[in-house]
Amino acid sequence: MSSDTDSNAPIIGVDIGGTKIAARRVNRNAETTGSAWLPTRAADGFDVSLAQVWSAIGQLLTADVQAIGICAPGPLNSKTGVILNPPNLPGWRDVPLAKMAAEKFGVPVTLENDCNAAALAEARYGAGRGHAIVFYAAIGTGIGSGIVIDGNLYRGAHDAAGEAGHVTVDYRSAVICTCGAPGCIEALASGAAIERDSSAPGTHVDELAAWLGSIVSLLDPGIIVLGGGVLGGHVRAPLLSRLRELVPHRTVNPCASQIPIVEPQLGALSGVIGAAMIARGNQ
């Protein structure tokens, strides 16, 4: 179900992660009020973690709330509102979350991939404003991404586009990704990979540069926005600086040096805001 309205009634945006659930009330201008921030308690099983989601929504639900937008890690089906089987949410298999939430709270509910939601928010209200093509990636435990073209999510022919974390950068690699393919960038340079191979941190920067160079060759984006927990604190600035230096040498695109590689402006709220935008009917 989706909502399409011209009013500025608040929408509840919810970002379900493997470790936390964040929720805010979001108006039409992407301004947020209220705050619910709960541990997901994913290891305690489906019933417990679902109750945490309901609790986060319940803390913000008032009579003027018009819809609820939820984003969560994939795989999921945004059209049917079903979470399929995300690896960091044990027991969440074939869960019709949008329907369940709509029946429980009595308002329309949408479901979207978390990186798609974050990409949309950054493109319209964050670092990507003014750019026709925005490539967003979150480098965390895994690597997720989203593509926004002319203000709209690019979903592909089968609603499966934007899985740039599973682009292979070394098909001969002995490292097998969770998707089953060798040498995906997620397997080689995500937070889990960096922790595993902490003795050779420079290798990961070269791999990320090769990956982003391929993205630039394919999409010719106006801007690249890189977020995620791996890019937190003192790591962010030097890594982004190094990538800006290396990426132009990893692509055939002669304008690569003109493509900004930046951090998100909305930070931890990008998923929440994006989910609410989609629920409002803007997508």
Image (cartoon, grey):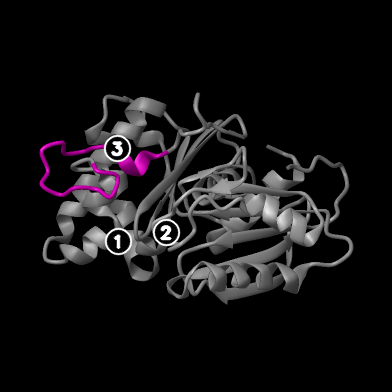
- Residue 70, by quadrant, is bottom right
**Tag 1 near tag 2, CB within 8 Å:** yes
Q: Is residue 44 above or below residue 168?
A: below
For the residue pair 75 and 147, the one nearer the viewer reads as 75
Q: Residue at x 15, y 49 (%)?
A: 175
* Type of amino acid under label 1: Gly
**Magenta-colored segment: predominant secondary structure:** loop
Residue 167's disc number = 3
* Type of amino acid under label 2: Gly
Whichever of labels 3 and 2 marks the residue nearer the N terminus, that label is 3
Residue under numbered circle 1: 191
Task: Tell me the SS state at disc 1.
Answer: helix
Whether residue 246 is visible to the viewer of this picture, yes or no, is no
Task: Tell me the SS state at disc 2.
Answer: loop
Calculate the distance from the C-alpha at mark 1 to the C-alpha at mark 2. Answer: 9 Å
For the residue pair 190 and 70, the one nearer the viewer reads as 70
**Tag 1 near tag 3, CB within 8 Å:** no
Specify start and end residues of the magenta stretch as a single range: 163-180
Question: In the displayed structure, does residue 2 sit left or right of residue 176?
Answer: right
Could you say where residue 133 lies in the image, as x and y percent from the top left? 51, 32
Could you say where residue 254 lies in the image, as x and y percent from the top left? 31, 25
Residue under numbered circle 2: 228
Question: In the displayed structure, does residue 245 sit left or right of residue 275?
Answer: left
Q: Residue at x 60, y 72 (%)?
A: 52
Which quadrant holds the C terminus?
A: top right
Question: In the displayed structure, does residue 27 sit left or right of residue 273?
Answer: right
Could you say where residue 19 lies in the image, as x and y percent from the top left? 46, 70
Q: Badge 2, how many Cα within 10 Å: few under 14, some, many 20+?
A: many
Q: Is residue 99 above or below residue 228?
A: above
Q: Badge 3, how many Cα within 10 Å: few under 14, some, many 20+?
A: some
Could you say where residue 11 lies in the image, as x and y percent from the top left? 76, 56
